[in-house]
Amino acid sequence: MNSTPVYIEISQASLKVLKEDAGLELPLERDTSGRLTAACKEKLVAGLQSFLDRKPWQPRTNAFCAIGANGVLLRRLTLPASAKEEFQRLLLLQIENEFPLPPDDLAWGWQPVEANNNKAAHREVLVAAVKKEGVEDYANVLSTCGVNPVFTVGALVRKSLCPPQLNPYAILELGRSQSELVTFDPGVPVTLRALPPANGASLAEAVRKNLGANWPGRKVFLTGANDEQAAQLQRQLGNGVACEALKIAGILGLKKSVEQNGGSPPLVLQVKTKRVGGSLNLSAPDVKKWAVRAAALLCALLILPYAEALLLKPFLARKLSALKADKGRLAVIDRELEFLQSLKQTQPPYLDAMYILAKSTPQGGKIDSLTMNRRGDVSLRGSLRDATQVTDFRTKLIGSGFFASVAVEEQAPTPDRQKLNLRISAQWKSVEARAGLTNGPTAEEIEKAKTGGKDTKGGGTMPPGMMPGMPASGLPPGFKLPPGVSLPADLPPEVLKQLQSAQH
């Protein structure tokens, strides 16, 4: 069984393949937009299938592909620390904000950044992205050849070829069609540029321009170059910058990076290939392969009725996983519920205080002004008929259990001596002390409000001028009842006698 991984380095002009100790280099032909031509795809499929020599029955192996710097953008993003699902959502929003294309139109990947001043409240990541169209061409070709492509950025994995550095440094890849320059600070990629090919002074000028006059690094490593080229570039750069040639092929940096990272590159580009219009039919159909597939399908149809339990097991496992994932949302719901309960407990009981004041105010009383604050201080000004009503009003407020203290600060008769002006201050109790109170109108009061104050229980007719709560003795001066009004028999004798006198 063949499971040996394949390493591929893709540049503008060629595609290099490494499998164990064997290597292959294939030229690339591109159209005016930079994508592979149809003829080039067919040649690549034929060359790769011959080199890989994969049998139809063998499992697919991974092909780790390092793409060139053309069109690749690097961004260093800072995100708040969060759960995995929330982090993915925030990362997509940041990518959509930072890059010119939406995430669905990009092949992108990320890796964490280990900064010295790492804060627990934030998470810093490096994101690399490139237009998905070009990467899809490579993915379709490699999928047709029977391998699973895994893409990364070639310039980022070359740092595995360099010895550990404590200061900022740069890596320059010299190529026939173009060169690539990437800077690290010290181990985190900062910039990535595609430069003109290696042709002496023009390359040195491009390197100097991209590094900048204030670049803090003093070391440039060269791949695909010899000592003479490194010495020449060092003289041309000047300014104390040392150049060192790494006499190792760049594709070996990809292999070393994958091995050091546990079988995967540190940064993997996510690519969703589209199989539209037979874009993968780049070679002649294999009759034997299709015959094997037809036989396998026939066997599956024969076994399917007896494998229902095995077929349903993955479905039930997915449902269970979905339920466990939804269970994680309960913590969020609990936090929101606690927040709403906290709001309910801490909100001032203004309506409750106003209801108790209105219910406790005697008949004929008047409240001119009322002030309350969040600390529970209540102050009101009003007028009542006499001192008895003042005492009754204060007694009802204290008896409600809502107020901790009620004090009559001031009371004075009006100029006509008919009423008393008063000022009362109160303080309502704490939340814990009010927990057992039931504030609000009773069912009987609500029903009475619906009927407009009419007596629906007794069958008598209420005389005109009589209102609920009228005192049992004494009528207003000059009060007269029209003739013919029937009086209820259940009135107190004193009131019945006075009303009969007023009727005559």
Image (spheres, rainbow, N blue to C red):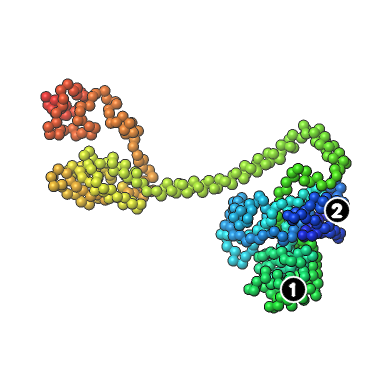
Q: Is residue 377 visible?
A: yes
Q: What residue appears at the point 68 percent right and 78 percent down from the top-left corner?
A: 239
Residue of label 2:
47
Three-letter code for the amino acid on which mark 2 is drawn: Gly
Q: Quadrant of residue 292?
A: top right
How would you rate the neighbour count of disc 1 (Cα within 10 Å): few for under 14, some for 14-19, many for 20 or more?
A: few
Residue 492 horizontal/vertical position (percent): 19, 28
Q: Residue 352 at what x, y percent from top left?
A: 34, 43
Residue at point 77%, 32% (across, down): 305
Q: Distance from label 2 to label 1 (Cα)?
A: 37 Å
Residue at the top extreme, as displayed = 484
Q: Eyeballing the image, is 312 above or below 237?
A: above
Closer to the N terminus: mark 2 or mark 1? 2
Q: Secondary structure at mark 2?
A: helix
Would residue 58 appear left or right of 325 to someone viewing this image? right
Q: Which residue is labeled 1 in the image? A: 201
Residues packed near mark 2 inside 10 Å, few (<14), some (14 to 19) or many (20 plus): some
Of the numbered discs in the image, which one, if any, rests on residue 1? none
Extreme residue toward the front, this view: 32
Find residue 396 and report its horizontal and vertical position in percent.
Answer: 26, 42
Query: In screen coordinates, is 479 left or right of 336?
Result: left
